[in-house]
Image (spheres, helix red, strand yellow):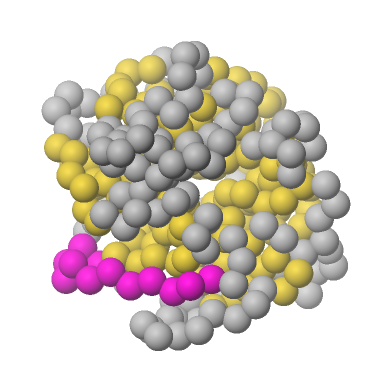
Amino acid sequence: MSCMPPHAEITRVINCQNQLGEGPIWSPLHQKLWWVDVSTPTLWRFDPLSGATDRWPLPKPPAVIALRQSGGLLLLFRRGHLLLDQLVPGDTIPEPLPLDLENDRLNDGRVDAAGRLWVGSLARDLRSPVGKLYLFEGGDRNPPLRPVESGFTLSNGIGWNPERTLMYFADTHSKTIHTFDFDLETGGLSSKRVLTQISGEGGPDGLTVDADGNVWVAIFGAGAVHCYRPDGKLVRSVELPTAYPTSCTFGGVDLDTLYVTSASTDFHGDPVPEGDGGGALWAVKGVGRGQAESLLPY
């Protein structure tokens, strides 16, 4: 099991100048890529077949995009949620419904193979370990968020191995990627342990798991996407033309393009140096294939 072949082709797909591009997700229904700009609240969509790019202003900073079997989306915001039907250019996205969170706010998430949406949270001060890992149960549930794990500072990427027996979860400020044993039938987590702890510059941001079970994670501040085996061994590092990649996902007809979002601001919200390449959408070819994205059953 490896992250080879060794040669990667890196291209800048769109110079979208996102302040904080995040949450790339490939739609298997429409063969398009979705992502968001958190700091300039915007929903983005890219069609690689036609080259068309669409975007919709959002009323608040977004946290998670989830795909629905109906073809629509669920958007989670830092403290809100919103169901959307299929969007066309020019649509206006309304205000989200509020969510009751006490000392934290939502940040990143993903749908598992059973159609459950997992979402992490972060401390408002970005320092206190009050962040949680939630299940968003939505619908008429009150409350719609059910905490499963806690003690995180800046929750980020979530993913599963192809067998759906392991779940991976990144905490950026502790520079840690956690592994859980995962029960797909019940959604149960157990045997929490450390897959790896990032040394040197940067921290783990968004992640995805490829068809061979390797974990690909954007290292924000270090200008690379790392590839780890399930035993935690680093077997590949793809260096990017920006120091601030934020997240990654596999897309394309054959799921063989690794799309990488990035930021034009650093950890402190300051603009990155001129010429860094931050804020663009990047594509990496020749590094393997991903798994099909799971959908919400509504």
Magenta residue check for 198: no
Rendered image quadrant of residue 114: bottom right
Q: Nearer the viewer, residue 231 or 51?
A: 51
Image point (44%, 51%), residue name: 19
- The image shows residue 167, relative to residue 51, as above or below, that is above
User: Position of 271 compared to 165: left or right?
Assistant: left
User: Position of 66 compared to 256: left or right?
Assistant: right
- In percent of width and height, residue 106 lies at 67, 52
Q: Nearer the viewer, residue 273 or 168?
A: 273
- The image shows residue 227, relative to residue 108, as above or below, that is above
Image point (77%, 47%), residue name: 104
Count of picture labels: 0
Image point (44%, 41%), residue name: 271
- In percent of width and height, residue 221 lies at 44, 29
Q: Magenta region: which residues?
A: 47-58
Q: Is residue 109 in view?
A: yes
Image quarter where the N terminus lies is: top left
- In percent of width and height, residue 125 lies at 74, 39
Image quarter where the C terminus lies is: bottom right
Magenta residue check for 57: yes
Image point (34%, 54%), residue name: 17
Q: Is residue 297 in view?
A: no
- The image shows residue 50, relative to residue 166, as above or below, that is below
